């Protein structure tokens, strides 16, 4: 049944949803940039993703993060756990189902002060219907899903 659910999501929503490969990186960065180059602080300060600039970037957890302003970069440097997305930026729905999947930086939710990303807006809709329970499940499974 879990495989059927993964195939449904991958097929219907265009997301590659497969079990983690050995040694999956702790931060999802398919483009070489965390959050695809979006500013993680902007989700909180602007209410959504804002493109980061090369002039305001830093390395954290082995990945390059970009910010729209120097102030946002400084905020992140002081408290990265506050602004970094849950589950390393991998899909929160997938993590709650026991696997990892890529994300769309536009498909986000802030729940109880934490940033969660999903593979698509359609997956986000499914995830938000039972977000609290899914977060509890994903929190227990993470970071073991990367092994």
Image (cartoon, rainbow, N blue to C red):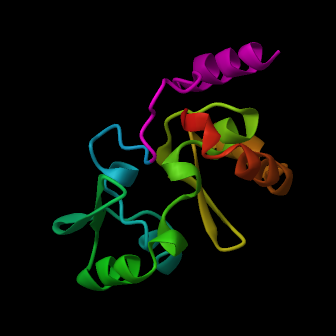
| Quarter of the image where one finds residue 145 | top right
Q: Which residue is drawn at 66% across and 36% down?
A: 94
Residue 10 image offset from top left, x and y in percent: 59, 21
x%, y% of residue 128?
76, 51
Q: Residue furthest left?
A: 55
Between residues 10 and 20, which one lies in front from this camera angle? 20
- 24 is within the stretch colored magenta: yes
Count of numbered tags: 0
Q: Residue at 68% of width from left, 21% of height from top?
A: 6
- Tell me if 113 is positioned left or right of 57 in this view: right
Residue segment shown in magenta: 1-26
Image quadrant for the N terminus? top right
Is residue 94 positioned above or below 70 on the image? Answer: above
Left or right of residue 95, residue 77 in this image: left
Res 78 → quadrant? bottom left
Point 48% across, 80% down: residue: 45
| Residue drawn at (30%, 86%) of the image | 71
* Left or right side of 37 for 91: right
């Amino acid at each position: 049944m879990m495989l059927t659910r993964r195939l449904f999501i991958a097929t219907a929503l265009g997301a590659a949803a497969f079990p983690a490969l050995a040694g999956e990186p702790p931060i999802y960065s398919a483009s070489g940039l965390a959050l695809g180059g979006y500013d993680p602080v902007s989700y909180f300060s602007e209410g959504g993703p804002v493109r980061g600039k090369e002039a305001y970037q830093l390395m954290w957890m082995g990945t390059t993060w970009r910010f729209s302003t120097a102030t946002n970069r400084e905020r992140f440097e002081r408290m990265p756990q506050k602004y970094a997305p849950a589950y390393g930026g991998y899909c929160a729905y997938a993590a709650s189902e026991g696997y990892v999947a890529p994300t769309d930086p536009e498909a986000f939710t802030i729940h109880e002060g934490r940033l969660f990303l999903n593979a698509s807006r359609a997956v986000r809709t499914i995830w938000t219907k039972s977000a609290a329970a899914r977060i509890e499940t994903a929190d227990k499974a993470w970071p073991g899903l990367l092994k």
